[in-house]
Image (spheres, helix red, strand yellow):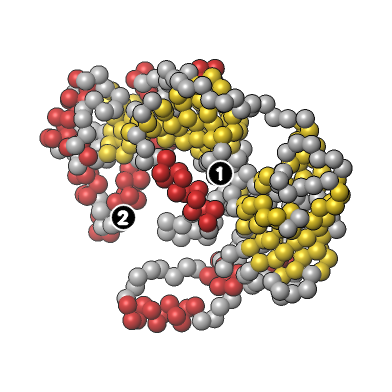
């Protein structure tokens, strides 16, 4: 949890600095939205869900692919937004528009902006009407990409902030496969730094106008900072790597129990009596090395992509499940020669062990923690406690379907880790 908290605090702080940059606004009519709220109208009382129903997923995907970012606005927002704030306003599935919003639209177009209607019957003078499949061409004609992404991918999104004499881009891979691509920011700044989003350290520096090559693992983010200052040079060139699979022999100890031999990959649920174990297990092995010259990492492996459709099976309501299975189930804490090296909980599953590794014999300990799902799925008291809580306080939450809690759970060390040595 401390690692996650530091990561979230760092990015939350960063994304509150300066001013936001978004060239596109997607408009939702309050009148249309409220007209469909409630079960009697065939909808729900969730305004976010009802707004999402009016905006096909292809619209934000097309905006992303065009190298642009967007804000969601409504009739209340336009009261305080300057008409020249956006270059493009997209009006999807709209039949009613307030007079104040119509006036704002007129001023926005007069200030040089463009209005694009998609499946809308409302009259907006000066707006162009297109089908969803024609949105990409309309955006290309109306706005220059803020971040040109090559090759284009709807999985790649970004947030752009202007911060004094610098510009900050948070670039994220929202998909379940590794994405390798280049970005060219729309900027006059000469130099860039790429920061690791989890640790905050500088990964590399270079000239901003030449394009920036990126490789992001599933759901991974990185930070690009642009300025005219010349930063200390950090080379983007990857050194030669020597890969040593840590094939063992391994031992594992659950909690305070004695250690026993184990073969990797190792899935706790496959062992008799371990299906409903929630807790920790410590894996230990050793490796002998010659002279160490350069940095070293332990790589726990890449994520496995779920089959198409598997991510949605069994989900209820606003539930969400990532489309990958991690090489660790679920979090791992690493110690080398008794030195704590870090915790991995998200892609890429790598930890730098340069300061702890030494010539000769090295002891590697990996403490793997799973979630409470295993234990909760077998807890006979949960439903009774939930019923008592509802009787006393009313329905404050919807009980999870615990019969499905174990459907996709795999705990343990699910791949053979690799020792990565950087060779000068």
Q: Which residue in the protein does label 2 denote?
A: 46
| Residue 136 screen position, x and y as percent | 41, 25
In depth, the one of 100 and 95 nearer the eye is 100
Residue at figure coordinates x 54%, y 44% from the top left: 198
Q: Which residue in the protein does label 1 denote?
A: 199
Q: Nearer the viewer, mark 2 or mark 1?
A: 1
> Which image quadrant: the C terminus?
top right
Residue at figure coordinates x 56%, y 22% from the top left: 206
Q: Does residue 42 appear to the left or right of 59 in the view shown?
A: left
| Residue 303 screen position, x and y as percent | 65, 47
Residue at figure coordinates x 73%, y 38% from the top left: 295
Residue 266 visible in the picture: no
| Residue 43 screen position, x and y as percent | 30, 54
Q: Earlier in the sequence, mark 2 or mark 1?
A: 2
In the rendered image, the vertical position of residue 175 relative to residue 283, given as above or below: above
| Residue 310 screen position, x and y as percent | 58, 52
Residue at figure coordinates x 78%, y 33% from the top left: 423
In the rendered image, the vertical position of residue 71 relative to residue 339, given as above or below: above
């Amino acid at each position: 949890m401390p690692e996650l908290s530091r990561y979230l605090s760092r990015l939350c702080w960063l994304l509150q600095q300066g001013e936001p940059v978004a060239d596109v606004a997607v408009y939702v009519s309050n009148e249309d939205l409220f007209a469909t709220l409630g079960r009697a109208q065939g909808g729900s009382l969730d305004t976010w869900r009802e707004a999402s129903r009016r905006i096909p997923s292809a619209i934000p995907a097309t905006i992303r692919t065009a190298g642009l970012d967007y804000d969601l606005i409504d009739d209340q927002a336009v009261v305080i937004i300057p008409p020249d704030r956006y270059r493009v306003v997209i009006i999807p599935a709209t039949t009613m528009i307030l007079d104040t919003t119509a006036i704002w639209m007129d001023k926005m177009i007069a200030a040089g902006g463009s209005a694009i209607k998609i499946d809308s019957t409302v009259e907006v003078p000066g707006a162009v009407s297109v089908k969803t499949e024609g949105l990409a061409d309309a955006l290309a004609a109306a706005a220059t990409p803020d971040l040109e992404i090559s090759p284009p991918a709807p999985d790649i999104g970004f947030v752009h902030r202007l911060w004094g004499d610098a510009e900050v881009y948070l670039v994220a891979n929202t998909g379940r496969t590794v994405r390798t691509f280049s970005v060219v920011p729309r900027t006059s700044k000469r130099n860039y730094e790429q920061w690791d989003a989890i640790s905050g350290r500088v990964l590399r520096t270079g000239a901003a106008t030449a394009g920036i090559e990126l490789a992001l693992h599933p759901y991974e983010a990185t930070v690009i900072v642009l300025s005219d200052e010349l930063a200390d040079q950090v080379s983007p060139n990857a050194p030669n790597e020597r890969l040593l699979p840590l094939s063992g022999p391994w031992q594992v100890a659950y909690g305070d129990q004695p250690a026993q031999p184990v073969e990797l990959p190792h899935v706790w649920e496959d062992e008799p009596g371990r299906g409903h174990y929630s807790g920790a297990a410590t894996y230990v092995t050793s490796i002998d090395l010659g002279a160490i010259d350069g940095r070293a990492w332990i790589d726990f492996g890449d994520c496995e992509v779920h089959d198409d459709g598997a991510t949605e099976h069994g989900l209820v309501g606003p539930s969400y499940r990532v489309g990958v299975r991690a090489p660790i189930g679920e979090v791992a804490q690493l110690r080398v020669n008794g030195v704590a090296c870090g915790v991995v909980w998200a892609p890429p599953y790598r930890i730098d062990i340069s300061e702890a590794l030494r010539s000769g014999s090295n002891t590697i300990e990996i403490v793997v923690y799973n979630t409470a799902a295993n234990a909760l799925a077998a807890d006979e008291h949960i439903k009774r406690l939930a019923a008592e809580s509802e009787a006393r306080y009313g329905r404050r939450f919807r009980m999870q379907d615990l019969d499905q809690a174990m459907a996709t759970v795999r705990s343990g060390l699910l791949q053979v880790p690799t020792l990565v040595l950087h060779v000068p």
